[in-house]
Amino acid sequence: MAFQIVINLIIAVMWMFLSETYTLTSFISGYILGIVLLLLLNRYIPGRFYLDRLLKVIQLILLFIKELIKSNIDIVKLVYTPKPEIEPGIFAYQTELETDWELTLLANLITLTPGTLSVAISNDNSIIYIHAMDIDDIDESIQSIKMTFEKAIMEVTR
């Protein structure tokens, strides 16, 4: 990914020098030309196309913001209910993530979402223990995390 960014920047600077206009507009047009060239030569360059990963990172951020807003609304509903019927509890979440960075990101995204808290990670890094403020269905909570955060993290890192 870093190699592709450097190549793209070199193409943009070369475009500025070849066109003999040293403006931001010339640099941006050279950068766009570099993106097109990298897309055309993608099979000869190692790794995934770097803008693909950047788009996945943006999607992960937007997913987190969506889940944050949704969980905040759920927490506000619970707080303003006269006699809330909540079932707090801790459940074990079996993860498919492998690296420390992926596990840390998932644990932090879970903790930053209101109503949930990552309590601990097992020694073999395969289980995250999560405290939830209201657990209606444990399997539904596990599937929700697996289909949102874990899937998005895997798309970014792999």
Image (spheres, rainbow, N blue to C red):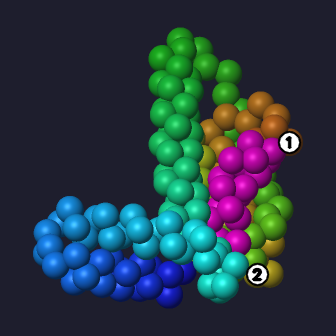
Quarter of the image holding residue 56?
bottom right
Residue tagged by mark 1?
Answer: 139
Q: Amino acid at mark 2?
A: Asn
Q: In this rendering, would 138 be left or right of 25?
A: right
Find residue 20 and report its horizontal and vertical position in percent: 16, 78
**Which of 5/75 is in front?**
5
Q: Quadrant of residue 153?
A: bottom right
Q: Is residue 101 above or below residue 71?
A: below
Q: Position of residue 28 (x, y in %)?
A: 28, 65
Rendered residue at 70%/79% (across/down): 43
* 148 left or right of 104 in image: right
**Magenta region, residue range:** 142-158
Residue 69 part of the magenta segment: no
Q: Residue at x 20, y 62 (%)?
A: 25
Mark 1 to mark 2: distance in Å?
23 Å
- Residue 105 against residue 137 in the figure, above or below: below
Depth-wise, is mark 1 or mark 2 nearer the camera? 1
Task: Name the spot of residue 3 as percent of width and height, x first.
Answer: 50, 87
Q: What kind of residue is marked 1?
A: Asp
- The residue drawn where x is 66% and y is 44% is 132
Side of 109 relative to 144 (left or right)? left
Give how far across and how far down residue 54 sits, in percent.
Answer: 51, 63
Q: Which mark is residue 123?
A: 2
Q: Does 105 appear above or below 110?
A: below
Q: Is residue 53 left or right of residue 155?
A: left
Residue 111 visible in the picture: no
Query: Could you say which is closer to the camera, residue 41 or residue 75?
Result: 41
